[in-house]
Image: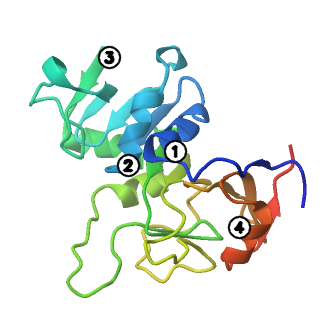
């Protein structure tokens, strides 16, 4: 295998905050970013103030800060997942319809979403497992997946049963086709290129060879 991959076999898998921190470091300075409901919202807690990143939440806010705790909690100031957040200087509020116009109009540089499955081609499945009785969660994921200029997925790589979430083809109902650019997981970070192989850029607690043996997806070592 190529030595260009940063293999951290002596540590990992990453915890939720560590995953969010790794993703946060790769968000371009000054980018306009939407953080999806659930684990993606933790990314906001790891953005340094000097990054200039502007966070958008689909319920109508630009300039969202980290999660609010203690006396900083304002019950009227929440993100799309209904969790209390802070506001940064210059924050703006607007109608829900205007928020979705920003999402659909290509005004967001990047969005971070969770996923049930991602295919090797970058197809995203994150709103329904298709299981009888499962509660679908459409939300704004479809609008973000096709409207944002880049889509980063934050998820664990394997289910509790050990089944991979990075697959050749999604078997769950699709959110959008060929929209995912990068996948950040607890054991590896991947880049979707649209080619024949998925690039592996970094691993934690697992080697490239072991990763390749556990995934039914063509993998390649990323070059520097």
Quadrant containing the C terminus in the rendered view? top right
> In 3D space, how far apart are the residues under numbered discs 1 and 3 (Cα atoms)?
24 Å
Instruction: Specify the farthest residue to the bottom.
Output: 132
Viewer-side label of 3, 2: 2
Vertical comparison of 26 with 138: above or below: above
Identify the residue at horizontal 24%, vertical 88% (top origin): 132
Instruction: Specify the farthest residue to the left.
Output: 75
- Mark 1: give few (<14), some (14-19) or many (20+) Cα within 10 Å: many
Residue 6 showing in the rendered view = yes
User: Which residue is at the front of the view, 167 or 162?
Assistant: 162
First in residue order: circle 1 vs circle 3: 1
Q: Are marks 1 and 4 in contact (CB under 8 Å)?
A: no
Relative to 36, 27 lies left or right: right
Q: Where is mark 3, residue-wise?
A: 88
First in residue order: circle 1 vs circle 2: 1
Horizontal and vertical percent position of residue 69:
21, 26
Q: Are marks 1 and 2 in contact (CB under 8 Å)?
A: yes
> In 3D space, how far apart are the residues under numbered discs 1 and 4 (Cα atoms)?
18 Å
> In 3D space, how far apart are the residues under numbered discs 1 and 2 (Cα atoms)?
9 Å
Q: Are marks 3 and 2 in contact (CB under 8 Å)?
A: no
Q: Where is mark 4, residue-wise?
A: 211
Relative to 97, 120 lies left or right: right
Q: Which element type, helix, strand or loop, lies under badge 3? A: strand
Q: Are marks 2 and 4 in contact (CB under 8 Å)?
A: no
- Mark 4: give few (<14), some (14-19) or many (20+) Cα within 10 Å: some
First in residue order: circle 4 vs circle 3: 3
Viewer-side label of 2, 4: 4
Q: Where is mark 2, residue-wise?
A: 39
Q: Which element type, helix, strand or loop, lies under badge 2? A: helix
> In 3D space, how far apart are the residues under numbered discs 3 and 2 (Cα atoms)?
21 Å
Q: Which element type, helix, strand or loop, lies under badge 4? A: helix
Q: Where is mark 1, residue-wise?
A: 19
């Amino acid at each position: 295998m190529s030595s260009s991959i940063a293999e951290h076999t002596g540590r990992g898998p990453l915890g939720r905050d560590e995953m969010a921190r790794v993703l946060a470091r790769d968000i371009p300075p000054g980018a306009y970013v939407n953080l999806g409901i659930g684990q993606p919202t933790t990314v906001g807690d790891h953005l340094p103030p000097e990054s200039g990143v502007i966070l958008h939440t689909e319920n109508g806010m630009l300039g969202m800060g980290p999660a609010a705790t203690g006396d900083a909690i304002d019950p009227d100031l929440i993100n799309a997942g209904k969790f209390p957040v802070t506001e940064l200087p210059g924050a703006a509020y607007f109608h829900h319809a205007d928020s979705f116009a920003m999402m659909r109009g290509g005004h967001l540089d990047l969005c971070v979403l969770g996923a049930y499955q991602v295919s090797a081609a970058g197809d995203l499945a994150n709103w329904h497992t298709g299981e009888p009785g499962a509660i679908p969660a459409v939300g704004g994921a479809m609008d973000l997946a096709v409207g944002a200029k880049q889509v980063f997925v934050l998820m664990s790589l394997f289910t509790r049963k050990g089944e991979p979430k990075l697959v050749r083809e999604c078997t769950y109902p699709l959110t959008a086709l060929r929209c995912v650019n990068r996948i950040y997981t607890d054991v590896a970070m991947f880049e979707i290129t649209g080619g024949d192989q998925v690039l592996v850029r970094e691993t934690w607690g697992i080697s490239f060879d072991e990763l390749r043996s556990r995934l039914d997806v063509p993998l390649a070592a990323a070059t520097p």
